[in-house]
Image (spheres, rainbow, N blue to C red):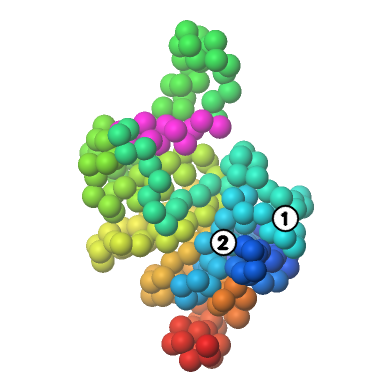
Amino acid sequence: MRAPEQEAGAGETLLAVDNITLSFGGVRAIRNVSLDIRKGEIRAIIGPNGAGKTSMLNVINGFYHPQEGLISFRGAERRRMKPYEAASQGIARTFQNVALFRGMTTLDNIMAGRTLKMHRNFFWQLVHWGPAAREEVENRRKVEEIIDFLEIQAIRKTPVGRLPYGLQKRVELARALAMEPDLLLLDEPMAGMNLEEKEDMSRFILDVNQQLGTTIALIEHDISVVMDLSDRVVVLDHGEKIADGLPAEVQANQNVIEAYLGVSH
C-alpha cells in the first residue's frame, strides 16, 4: 500500500499529453485525451479492453504519432516523438508480450539495454582495449547491480527462452532499468502471472519507484494491484478519458463502475 504522503502524487510534471487524438483509418483509438505524469509518482492507466491504453503508451514513446495534440517531456514540446528520441531522453518501455532475445542469456539481454550508454566508436569496440574495455566493465557493473536488485542472480547465464514466464517479465524489467530511465512505461507487467509472481513484481515496482526514484506509468488489469501501487489513476473507455484522480476517487466513480460492468455501452 502506498504511504499517505505519496498518494497525492505531488511533484513537478515530467510528461504531459494535451488533447491527443489518434486515428487508424476511420477508427479513433484515442479521442482528445489529456493527462500528465508527475515526477516520482506511479501513474496508472486503466480501462476495459479496447479503451486505448496501449495506444497511449505507444504515443508517449513514439511508436504512434497522433494526428492532433502535443506531448511535452521535461518541459520540451514534441508533436512527433520518435522511439529512439524517447529512449535517448530517458523513457524506457516494457510490453504486453515479452520482447526478449530468447536465445540470449539473462545477462546479455540486460546488457542490450545499455546500448545507449556505450559511446566508444566501432574501432575501440572491435579491438576491445583501452577506453572500450573500461566502458564495458562499467556497463557490466551496472547490469550486475540490477541483477542483484531484482534478485535474478541464479538465472544470469540462463537463456531467457528457458525461463518461466514470470521470470521473463522480470528480465524485461531489468533490461528497461538498464537504460536508467527517468520515466518507465510498464504495459501489463503482471499479465499471465500467478499470485506469488504478482506479489513479487508489485514489490519490485515499488522498489524501483521508491529506492531508484524512477517515475512509472503502468497499464494493469488487476484493479487490486492498481489501487495498492498507484498514486493517481486515469481511466480510458473507448478512447476517451472518463475519470482521473486518486485511486479511491476513481474506484468510486460511477462512470468507471459502469464502464467496467459494461452498462454504459
**Circle nearer the viewer, 1 or 2:** 2
Residue at 47% x, 44% y is 176
In percent of width and height, residue 198 lies at: 31, 62
| Residue holding disc 2 | 55
Give the quadrant of residue 181. Answer: top right
Residue located 62% across and 76% down the image: 241
Q: Secondary structure at mark 1?
A: strand
Amino acid type at circle 2 is: Ser
Across and down, in percent, residue 128 comes to 46, 11
Q: Is there any visible trace of residue 233 in the rendered image?
A: no
Q: CA distance from mark 1 to mark 2?
A: 17 Å
Neighbor class of circle 2 (other Cα within 10 Å; few <14, some 14-19, many 20+) is: some
**Residue 5 percent location from the top left of the image:** 54, 70
Q: Which mark sits nearer the N-terminus, 1 or 2?
A: 2
Is 106 a magenta residue?
yes
Residue drawn at x 46%, y 27% is 139
Which span of residues is magenta-colored? 105-116
Image coordinates for residue 59, horizontal then vertical, percent: 62, 56
Q: Are marks 1 and 2 in contact (CB under 8 Å)?
A: no
Secondary-structure class at tag 2: helix
Identified by mark 1, the residue type is: Ser
How crowded pointer 1 is (Cα within 10 Å; few <14, some 14-19, many 20+) is rated as: some
Quickly name the residue at label 1. Answer: 72
Number of residue marks: 2
Kindly identify the residue that appears in the image at 46 percent across and 83 percent down.
260
Q: Is residue 169 visible?
A: yes
